[in-house]
Amino acid sequence: MKDAQGRQVTGRVRWRKFAVLAVPGFAATAALAVALANGALAASFAVSGQEFKVSAKSLEGEGFAQYGSVDTNARNDLLPVAVTAVKKAEIKSLCQSVVTHLPVIGDISLNLHAGQGKDPVKASDLFLDATQLRGNAEFRNLEIGRDASTLDKGPKGAQGLQDLFAQQADHVTINNMEQVAWATNAGTFSLSGLSMSIAKGKSECF
């Protein structure tokens, strides 16, 4: 393969070059075709045009994997994401928020809270397709730099494309988690003490 100046380019795709999948062109189209055929794209549905925010006091997870992938929306736009996958998770003080701007009315905020008491939110086969993730993390038996196609500690199907950067661990703890995401998938999702509210104006988890 050659660059725009006609110089020969060699080497494997790296994590920092993952955004090339979102660039129009033959190479990107071919890579995405392979990803679609292998089910390697992140969310199994067309995501909305709005990112949402998720925060939690803590997330405790067994069977952790993280790798790069791509979500798509109804317009077939390509949205690079970092997928965090967890086999079993317990989440304390979960907050989820999304702000929608409507003509004439203005901003409308949807907020969801759960796991505020002694019973945490519980999830299995949890996939979080994020564009930002912050918090204090601790891992047990961590592997960094593993090929994304060989991940085996996370949920079934938690694997990325061959040659892409990934990491995995037996256990993860994330305190004071803040995340901006396009999508969340889960096999089961038990929300203890669920409450949902809609309000005019901008009110977000963080």
Image (cartoon, rainbow, N blue to C red):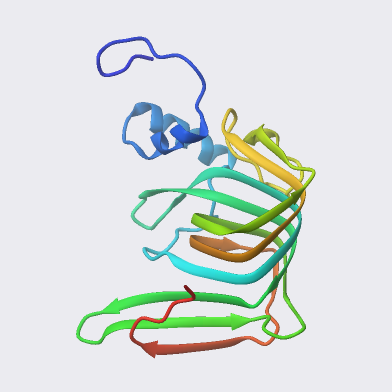
Viewer-side residue, 135 vs 41: 135
Query: Does 2 appear above or below 58?
Result: above
Query: Does 163 appear above or below 136?
Result: above
Viewer-side residue, 118 vs 22: 118
Query: Does 14 appear above or below 53?
Result: above
Residue drawn at x 49%, y 17% as measured from the top left: 11
Residue drawn at x 53%, y 69% as measured from the top left: 54
Instruction: Kindly indicate the quadrant of the structure image that contains residue 137.
Output: bottom right
Query: Does 43 appear above or below 33?
Result: below
* Res. 155 visible in picture: no
Q: Position of residue 196 (x, y in %)?
A: 53, 87
Question: Quadrant location of the N terminus?
Answer: top left
Q: Position of residue 33 (x, y in %)?
A: 47, 35
Residue farthest left in this picture: 104
Residue farthest front in this picture: 136
Residue drawn at x 51%, y 35% as measured from the top left: 15
Residue drawn at x 62%, y 38% as measured from the top left: 166
Q: Is 190 positioned to the left or the right of 10 in the image?
A: right
* Res. 123 visible in picture: yes
Q: Position of residue 31 (x, y in %)?
A: 46, 31
Q: Is 94 positioned to the left or the right of 81 in the image?
A: right
How many marks the image carries: the answer is 0
Instruction: Kindly indicate the quadrant of the structure image that contains residue 88.
Output: bottom right
Q: Position of residue 47 (x, y in %)?
A: 45, 60
Q: Is 60 positioned to the left or the right of 1 in the image?
A: right
